[in-house]
Image: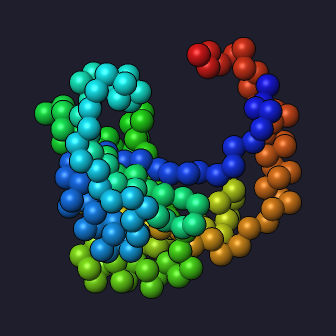
Amino acid sequence: MKLSKKMNYVHHVGLVCTDLDRSIYFYHDILGFEFQNEPTGWFEGPELAKGVAVPGAKLRQVSLWVDETTTFELIEYANRPADSVKPAPNNNLGAAHVCFHVDDIHQTKKELEAQGVKFNSDVNVVDEGPLAGWRWCYFSDPDGLVLELIQWDYYDKAQHEAAAQEYLKNRPALATLKPLF
């Protein structure tokens, strides 16, 4: 059963960083995201610990505007586990990446590289299959968190809607899958 009201949009994406101030230099000064709120001081307490499901949580955060509806939240935990020094590889459960749409991927990549940003590859071009029209490339923030640029050159909405409906008609029955909860 679907929700009675649809979700409106992605309000924010949150990433845990090792040093909030260093990350602000990257996301604000290099990527150009403006402040939604100034960096907070450290805060903690039982309600926070319960809400984020981290015993003894102590954190500070900042939110930066990506566009008029979406923000980017950076969180620094004072009690991050000592062995939590690298993000999970892309193929690990829980690994994530954030993708930013740009108008000119080649120019954006060139400008970021001029500021020292390292990319995993050249711009990848997809002109076949479900992702036809994508031009994309991955890069990382100072903590190694995975980010992506995408330029969407074209999209055949009718074709994708038909393919999605075909999938829904033929997908495995829920009873044959691992339970949702």
The image's colour scheme reads rainbow
Q: Is residue 43 visible?
A: yes
- Judged left or right of residue 152, residue 45 is left
Residue 30 on image: x %, y %:
31, 74
Dividing the image into 4 quarters, which one contains the N terminus? top right
Give the camera-side residue of 32 and 148: 32
- Residue at the (24%, 47%) spot, across then down: 41
Farthest-out residue, left: 82
- Judged left or right of residue 89, residue 126 is right
Q: Is residue 143 visible?
A: no
* 170 to 128, vertically: above or below: above
Q: Quadrant of residue 69?
A: bottom right
Q: Quadrant of residue 133?
A: bottom right
Q: How many marks?
A: 0
- Residue at the (53%, 74%) spot, across then down: 102
- Judged left or right of residue 54, residue 80 is left
Residue 175 on image: x %, y %:
72, 14
* 152 to 157, vertically: above or below: below
Residue 27 on image: x %, y %:
34, 66
Dividing the image into 4 quarters, which one contains the C terminus? top right
Give the camera-side residue of 65 and 88: 65
Q: Quadrant of residue 2?
A: top right
- Residue at the (67%, 65%) spot, across then down: 132
Residue 92 on image: x %, y %:
38, 36
* 125 to 80, vertically: above or below: below
- Residue at the (74%, 25%) spot, across then down: 172
